[in-house]
Amino acid sequence: MEFSHGDIFVGEVIGTAILILFGAGVCAAVTLRHSKARASGWVVIAFGWGFGVLAGAYTAGPLSGGQLNPAVTVGIAVDTGEWDQVPLYLLGQMVGASLGAVLAWLVYYAQFGANEEPTLGIFSTIPEIRNPVANLITEIIATVALVLPILAFGLTEGLGRSGTQTLIVAFLVVGIGLSLGGPTGYAINPARDLGPRIIHAVLPIPNKGTSDWSYSWVPVAGPLIGAVLSGLIFNAAF
């Protein structure tokens, strides 16, 4: 399906903003001291991100196809060889991710105002054990586990016509979070990590702590490497 440049940008901004609103929102709900959902756990976080993918991708789908993730965009481009619209998708995704982070902050404005602990984990990923090589490998593998199935889903024509492909991708994200998210927090999406990290750096959150720029390259490079590998594997195997 062909989308206009304007629709691509608007769709990716809106869809990615919804994704991050849900995702950062559930992290805030579980993390912030005065949230009613405090300490409700990793399963809640995994499903919150999955529902964010569901809502964002279905909303953006008619406008841009609802890619919402530079890794998905790059993986598709490696597969198809069509790169002309990639910068537009990436720009929309970065703007949308930043906007979604601001919206999540506004939803929990009072809780952030009473914050007493570092808050980067609400916005971006933090490795449980800081080992750049291991962390990079985790992000590469987790991204292949996302992008390669998405490319394969496109071979099943009925999934696209029925609209269930997006639903399946949402459950795929939940599964990745539950199974592969423990080491790094499963960025698997450069815009999802970098946009909110920038917003965390500039927001006036009390006691927010560092934005950890020394780690920030891992959740960008890992997913992009995984995306390229996914496209190459798909071309070779299917």
Image (cartoon, grey):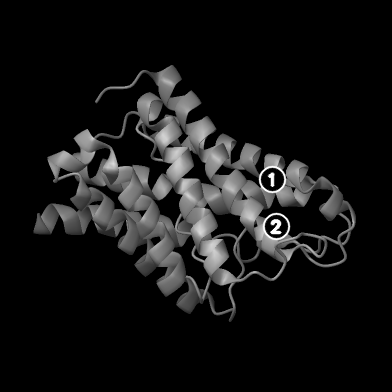
- Measured as percent of width and height from the top left, residue 202 is found at 78, 46
Image quarter where the N terminus lies is: top left
- Determine whether the residue tagged by mark 2 lies in a helix, strand or loop: helix
**In which quadrant of the rendered view does residue 6 lie?**
top left
Residue at image x 31%, y 52%? 168
Please tell me whether residue 221 is drawn above or below residue 53 in the rendered image. Answer: below
Q: Residue 21, relative to residue 41: is it above or below? A: above
Which residue is more in the foreground, 235 or 34?
34
What residue is drawn where x is 51% and y is 63%?
46
The percent coordinates of residue 9 (x first, y second) are 47, 26
Task: Quarter of the image for the C terminus: give it.
Answer: bottom left
Q: Residue at x 69, y 39 (%)?
A: 103
Above-or-below relation of 71 to 86: below
The residue depicted at 89 percent of the width and 56 percent of the height is 206
Residue 94 appears in the rendering: no
Q: How crowded is mark 1: few (under 14 residues within 10 Å), some or many (20 or more)?
A: many
- The residue wearing badge 2 is 28
Label 1 close to label 2 by CB (< 8 Å): yes
Q: Is residue 107 left or right of residue 183?
A: right
